[in-house]
Image (cartoon, helix red, strand yellow):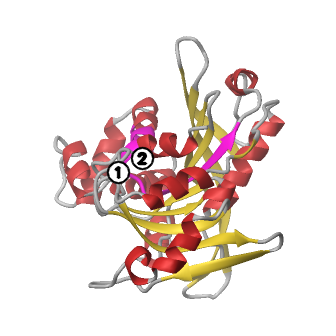
Amino acid sequence: MTDLEKSLYVAWIGRFGKKKVLELTANQAGAKTSDRIRALIKASSQATLNALLLEGFRGYFHQTVFLRRPKQAGQTIQALLKVKSNSDDRVHVQSREVSANGDRARLLLMVTRRMDFVLAQSSSIHAVDVPFPVALDISNNALIVQVMTMQSGVFTWGKIVGQDFRRILTFVRADFFNDQVLAFIGSSGGDSGNYLDCSKRAVELMKSERVDTYGGKYEAGADGHTEHKTVRGKGKKALRESRPKDFQSLIGAARIINCELIFRSKHAGLEAGSKVALYPSIGKIAFRSNLEGCDPDGFIKAMAKP
């Protein structure tokens, strides 16, 4: 494992949340949390670290999720199981989990992104190939791509790379990693199917009393859209209360472009207070709050139901 990879694992494991990090590093020596995480990494096998990252996607990491409906899930699973990664691949298979009857697979991938930074001292460009973990889950019901949210600043990236930076020239966007994974599936002989339009599920959720909706955009006519928002913050009301007519228009739409939700009570694996942005017409979910203690897989499966 390179120094860059070790620093990345420190950053990734640090995103589990304080409580989980303390649990994971309880038996590791070190005054600082980062030192204990480094000790954990040193003492762990690659298989253990892979399993840890997959656990993070199941219930701890801020993440963006992309949903598709596969056409030939079984064939795609078999194709991906035959892939042999090498160090030159931009998408590298780290681990595979397959169900007993072979109808579901979960893969941990490392997707490399070339990142450019401006050095603090010389103002020259410093380029680094950075691997990012992505979870891929395939079954007959859905093809799910989960990308960790990593909008770190200049100081954090400087610590990870081991340089002093003035600016970041390459930003980490989830859509890039999703596109890379879809291309990887195709080049491996698999089929990623089509985006899953979960507008119906989004409307059902907004109609319930479980969530507060603070904004939404929906298709209006053949070539247009309409957007409604309310100001968020302490003491501010959700769209249902502050602009009821606009709310009714939103939940009456056939296709929802996006909506911003905060959960009022526990539902489908998410705790009260969870913040989620949905982009239902393209099958995209962005979890905007700490998921410690939640089960995002439960919510993802609920949104992916036919």
Query: Which is more toward the observer, 66 or 232?
Result: 232
- Spatial CA distance of label 1 from label 2 is 7 Å
Q: Quadrant of the C terminus?
A: top right
Where's residue 112, x and y in %? 66, 53
Tell me which amino acid carries mark 2. Pro
Q: Which residue is mark 1?
A: 270
Left or right side of 12 for 284: right
Q: Specify the quadrant of the image occupied by residue 305.
A: top right
Say if residue 164 shows up in the picture. no
Element at badge 1? loop
Element at badge 2? helix
Disc number placed over residue 296 in the picture, else none: 2
Left or right side of 95 for 125: right
Region rendered in magenta: 52-69
The residue furthest top is 101
Q: Contact, CB < 8 Å: mark 1 with mark 2? A: yes
| 241 up-or-down from 82: above or below | below
Query: Which is more toward the observer, 292 or 8?
Result: 292
Say if residue 188 shows up in the picture. yes
Q: Residue at x 16, y 59 (%)?
A: 31
Q: Specify the quadrant of the image occupied by residue 281.
A: bottom right
Q: Residue at x 42, y 47 (%)?
A: 296
